[in-house]
Image (cartoon, rainbow, N blue to C red):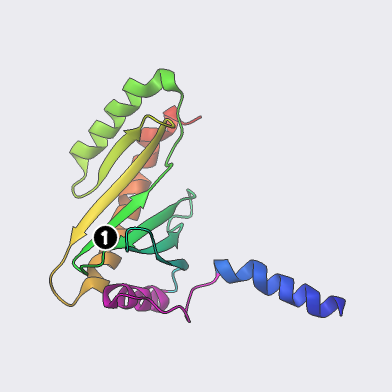
Amino acid sequence: MKKILAVLLLIALLAPCCTALADTATYATTRAFLKALDEEGITYVNRGLDEDNDEYIIVYNMDENHSYTMDIFFEEDQEHTSIFVWYIIAFDEADLLKVMLACDTLNGSYNYTCFYVDETDNTVTCSMNLIYRDKNVDLVVMDAIKYMAAILELAYPVLTPYAM
């Protein structure tokens, strides 16, 4: 009996960490992207539809040097997707202007991404908004998350001096 309970507990603990092969997505755009993630062996969680009717996917840590998640929202119109990496760093309020300047420098250096300060909790966020009209959404979003991961790798040395 203990072995069965141990196995069930292990399955319950590991299930959220495993690639969601069996998850079905509501939108065709999301399904195409999840298939691409499965083919690449990238770990994700399909959170389903949120209160805005966006399909919410979380992609875990594509960079071994830093821990983060990409929160990806596929819109109902199936032509727009937003990607966020929240809490890149938390910083001391006294460094607010320095961190804003660092974000401005990053925004001037890299296209298509936006780094900004959230003054409500003194953290830095990176975002990207995608618009697509054709059938290759899986490639567009996959390229976007890889591009964003590469930019984050370059951004960490700029932001880390201000991290608490």
Residue numbers of the magenta segment: 18-40
Furthest residue to the left? 133
At a point 37% along the width and 58% down the height, the residue shown is 51
| Residue occupying the far top of the picture | 94
Q: Nearer the viewer, residue 13 or 120?
A: 120
Assess whether residue 26 is covered by the magenta stretch: yes
Q: Quadrant of residue 134?
A: bottom left
Give the quadrant of the N terminus. Answer: bottom right
Residue sitting at x 24%, y 32%: 104
Q: Secondary structure at mark 1?
A: helix
**Residues packed near mark 1 inside 10 Å, few (<14), some (14 to 19) or many (20 plus):** some
Q: Is residue 72 above or below residue 111?
A: below
In the image, residue 150 sits, relative to residue 75, either above or below, namely above
Please tell me which residue is depicted at 37% across the width and 74% down the height of the picture.
Answer: 34
Picture layout, residue 161 above or below residue 70: above
Query: In x, y percent, where is residue 157?
Result: 39, 37
Q: Is residue 57 magenta?
A: no
Residue 158: percent from left, percent from top: 35, 34
